[in-house]
Image: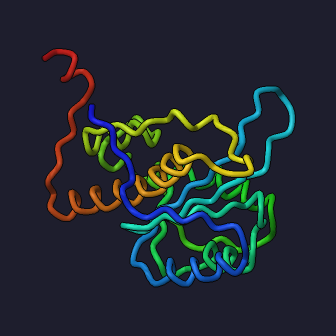
Amino acid sequence: MPRVLFEGRIIVVQSEAEASKAVDYLLAQPLLGFDTETRPTFRPGPMNMVALLQVASADTCFLFRLNHMGLTPSLIRLLSDKQVRKVALSWRDDTQQLHRLGDFEMGEFFDLQTHVGEFGIEDRSLQKLYANVFGQRISKGQQLSNWEAENLTNAQKLYAATDAWACLRIYEELEQLKRDNNWELIKDEELVSE
């Protein structure tokens, strides 16, 4: 399968002043994709704190460096917002991690993982969802990298932006298929017998 990458602007945000401007921009968009990244732990014990919050519109992704700036008032405003449609995958897990950084009321989020069952999709990882819906692959090569590094690499930035943007794209495509009633469920057994 061909590989897909986010092709829009990627903006790294490391201060409350930058976050405030970014949130103003994001809350003026009709639809947003969300994801988070945490430095992995390879031993049993406490988990690391979430280091990055990615929020994508159709053409711009902001990477909020939570390990540098914490959960700022503007980010709380974004997360608490109930007006703009926000789409994520396995958002319950991310929500728990974000609440470790501060207390806030979570706004309305559409969790793809709980809704793809309407289409009969059983593989619910982002990589498999994207492949099922678009026939393209998302690379997970940077997933286990150090998200607390002083500076993110270009590969990390692209990976993080792609994940948030992919949530938005999957949601848009599934909503279009639902509106058009233009989809067909192909079960694994049918694929095996062909």
Residue 150 pos. (x, y %): 74, 51
The quarter of the rendered structure image containing the C terminus is top left
Q: Nearer the viewer, residue 16 or 36?
A: 16
Q: Residue at x 65, y 53 (%)?
A: 94
Q: Residue at x 45, y 73 (%)?
A: 85
The residue at the far top in this view is 193
Say if residue 78 shows up in the picture. yes
Judged left or right of residue 181, residue 35 is right
Colour scheme in use: rainbow
Asked if 81 appears above or below 148 in the picture, the reply is below
Residue 140 pos. (x, y %): 49, 35
Say if residue 110 shows up in the picture. no
Residue 147 pos. (x, y %): 68, 46
Residue 174 pos. (x, y %): 29, 56
The residue at the far right in this view is 45
Asked if 127 appears above or below 104 in the picture, the reply is above
Judged left or right of residue 192, residue 164 is right
Judged left or right of residue 146, residue 129 is left
Q: Quarter of the image holding residue 169?
A: bottom left
Asked if 43 appears above or below 19 in the picture, the reply is above
Q: Residue at x 50, y 81 (%)?
A: 25
The quarter of the rendered structure image containing the N terminus is top left
Q: Quarter of the image holding residue 102?
A: bottom right
Judged left or right of residue 65, residue 192 is left
Q: Nearer the viewer, residue 128 or 16?
A: 16
Query: How many numbered badges does the structure rendering display?
Result: 0
